[in-house]
């Protein structure tokens, strides 16, 4: 086990190293993308990366406080389920209700790679490749279909 300070340092190194790899990656239109703080242009819709002892996940978090808006956006993503499933290397997990660590109920769709551990430096390359590959696919999907979701918020 690691102390809290050691865990914090490992996380900083892990995410810093991943960010360096993302900086060299262009978006679908050859543009520079802020991968670590990707702006969906929708206040309560986030693309997040997670890594821990069990594995790594690329998540679409739909966090509208208004349940009907959250359901509307989740439903719209389900309309693209076949397209999303074709693009991602793993089967996506679809959770219309998910208890976030912040205590709120959100909707979450995610791609996951299990059996890799962020606290094992030998796994970092594999985790980084997974997150980078999946995020590039998500960014390409968003470049193509994001406008559909932007129109929902109006």
Image: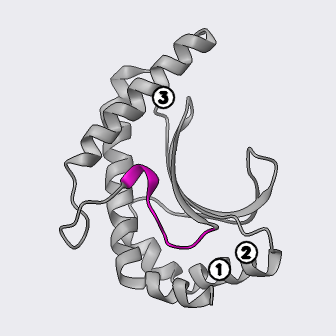
Which label is found at residue 111?
none
Alpha carbon distance from label 1 to label 3: 32 Å
Which label is found at residue 70?
2
Secondary element type, mark 1: helix
What residue does disc 1 label?
73
Secondary element type, mark 3: loop
The C terminus sits in image quarter: bottom right
Query: What segment is highlighted magenta in the picture?
Result: 35-43
The N terminus sits in image quarter: top right
Secondary element type, mark 2: helix
**Which of the two discs, 1 and 3, labels the residue nearer the N terminus?**
1
Q: Is residue 107 above or below residue 52?
A: below
Q: Residues within 10 Å of mark 3 (few under 14, many from 20)?
A: some
Alpha carbon distance from label 1 to label 2: 5 Å
Which label is found at residue 117?
3
Q: Are marks 1 and 2 in contact (CB under 8 Å)?
A: yes
Q: Is residue 119 visible?
A: no
Alpha carbon distance from label 3 to label 2: 31 Å
Q: Is residue 106 above or below residue 48?
A: below
**Residue at image x 50%, y 89%?**
148
Could you say where residue 153 lies in the image, as x and y percent from the top left? 62, 85
């Amino acid at each position: 086990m690691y102390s809290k300070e050691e865990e914090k340092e490992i996380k900083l190194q892990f995410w810093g190293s991943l960010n360096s790899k993302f900086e060299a990656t262009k978006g679908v239109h050859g543009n520079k993308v802020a991968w670590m703080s990707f702006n969906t242009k929708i206040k309560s819709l986030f693309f997040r990366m997670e890594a821990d002892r069990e594995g790594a996940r690329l998540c679409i978090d739909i966090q509208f406080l208004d349940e009907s808006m959250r359901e509307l956006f989740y439903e719209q993503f389900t309309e693209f389920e076949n397209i999303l499933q074709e693009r991602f290397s793993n089967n996506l997990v679809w959770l219309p209700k998910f208890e976030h660590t912040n205590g709120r109920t959100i909707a979450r769709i995610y791609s996951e790679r299990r059996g890799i551990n962020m606290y094992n430096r030998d796994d970092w390359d594999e985790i980084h490749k997974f997150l980078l590959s999946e995020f590039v696919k998500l960014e390409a999907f968003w470049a193509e279909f994001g406008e559909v979701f932007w129109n929902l918020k109006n």
